[in-house]
Amino acid sequence: MTSSIYVLKLSGTIQNLSARESRETPMPQERKGGTLVAVLSLAAMVVSLMQTQAVPILGLIAGKLGTSAANAGWVTTATLLSAAVMTPLLGRVGDQFGKKRTLLAVLALAVAGSAVAAVAGSLWLLLAGRALQGAATAIFPLALSILREELPPAKLHGAMAVVSGTLAFGSGLGLVVTGLLTQGTDPDYRIVFWFSTVVAAIALGLVAARVPATGHRGGGRIDLLGALTLGGFLVLLLLPLSQGNAWGWTSAATLGCFAASALVAALWVAVERRVAAPLVDLAMFTHRPVLFTNLAGMFVGFAMFVQFLGVSYLAQMPEFTGYGFGASVLRASLEFLLPGTIASMLAAPLGGMLVGRSGPRHTLVVSSGIGLMGYLWLIAAHGTPFSVIVAGILVGVSVSFAYASMPALIAASVPHHQSGVANGINSISRTVGSSLASAIFTTLLTSNTLKNLPPGAPELPAESGFTTAFVIAAVAYAITAAVALFGLRPAHAPAGLRGEAVKEPAAV
């Protein structure tokens, strides 16, 4: 709030009255900031809601559409691949041509994709809807860019933390709502997508009405060749991660995709070095704070998804296995996942306060310590619901703190006109981590199964698969702490960034 709001040369009586009124009544700018954060938080929640809502109902989708479980797995893969291609591109479009109009377009795609998925009577049409939903991932970097342009520095970290916290909350909410909506003897998966249609439509209307259209616009042309090569690299990387368990990790398809991704990555670097206005400024991409923040994002995304998958599957294991709780999908969501989801949302403002007081680097260290404690607890004592729930709460808080720190690290390291694409790539780094988690977790559970099961029982994973997954997630948090302590040291911006980035010494 600036001193120019008041006329400071008035008489002492009126000046005192004005001061008293300023303490008692929120100023329009403050109300505007609170409304902006609330609207963008809802919009960001759409991202994670759409990413996780289909995970618990893949078997239901396969049954309703008369297809195999392997084919139904493409329902999540389609969203993943679309996000990989569209997120950095749409982040750059927002930087160049206006973030509000780009955000509105992305939300419109999310509404359309959800509606298509809801009415789809075939797998191909459902995949088309899920691909459109994948574009929603770009909402998050666009929302952070708008906050950076519209809010004063004193309010920025807290606002970014709250908006970032809705990602973890939305991921858990997607699982919980799906469990609630698909109860009964004859559940219909389509109602899940109708729910996301309504949420996305509400977010679209609120963004149109409440988000200002001001801000920086870089202008210029879109680097289509850079977008194609970056998208190709990410697709070729994420495709075998999502399908490798079905294809076989040593199959020609899996190894061929990994090899091709390396070649296309080299091509992308060559293209970006020769383009006058590249999609991704390589100086920004390799700038140490940005590079290590993206690395941290990958490990945090990995740890978060292991918790979602691990706790959900662990809770649903039959009691005769000797380690499961025999929970239904609904009970697993409400009893075991919802507490951590709520904790992550409540911790978001605390994460913003910690970022403001100690800096995002130290906040990331604290986050890693809390997450490591959660997984150590889960490794040592996952035999009771209480232990699993408490460990989940610790992981939820850690994810919220990490998500609060990473946007601040990015904001302190890149100029305004690169905020969208920089946050977009950070979002993709978390997506890569989540894909790795899914691939490793699935492989661990299918490679070591229980013996001497009761007659007629399906093949079930051994407890060691869960324990190993939790150990790997704990290592991921330990690496994140090392990245924050030793990688995110204060460093000078490269020539392309010097003088333009936000000056926040505590950020790195």
Image: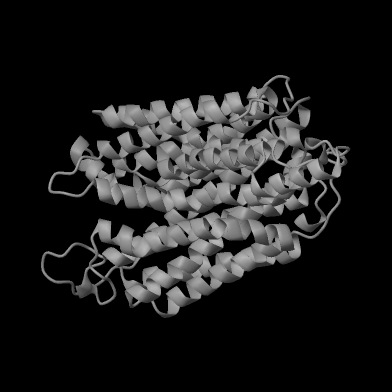
Q: Residue at x 56, y 46 (%)?
A: 163
Towards the viewer: 327 or 269:
327
Q: Residue at x 19, y 42 (%)?
A: 63
Q: How many marks?
A: 0
Towards the viewer: 383 or 348:
348
Can residue 276 be seen at all in this image of the molecule? Answer: yes
Relative to 413, say whether 374 is above or below: below
Relative to 357, say whether 41 is above or below: above
Q: Residue 274 location in percent, x, y?
A: 77, 28
Side (left or right) of 316 relative to 134: left
Q: Residue 400 location in percent, x, y?
A: 55, 57
Relative to 219, say whether 494 is above or below: below
Relative to 112, say whether 494 is above or below: below
Side (left or right) of 469 relative to 269: left
Q: Residue 431 location in percent, x, y?
A: 52, 47
- Residue, far bottom: 380
**The C terminus lies in which quarter of the figure?**
bottom right
Side (left or right) of 30 relative to 447: right
**The N terminus lies in which quarter of the figure?**
top right
Q: Residue 489 location in percent, x, y?
A: 79, 60
Q: Residue 366 sits in which quadrant?
A: bottom right
Towards the viewer: 418 or 256:
418
Can residue 299 be seen at all in this image of the molecule? Answer: no
Q: Residue 401 sits in which quadrant?
A: bottom right
Identify the image's colour scheme: rainbow, by chain, secondary structure or one colour.
Answer: one colour
Q: Residue at x 69, y 36 (%)?
A: 150
Q: Residue at x 74, y 25 (%)?
A: 218
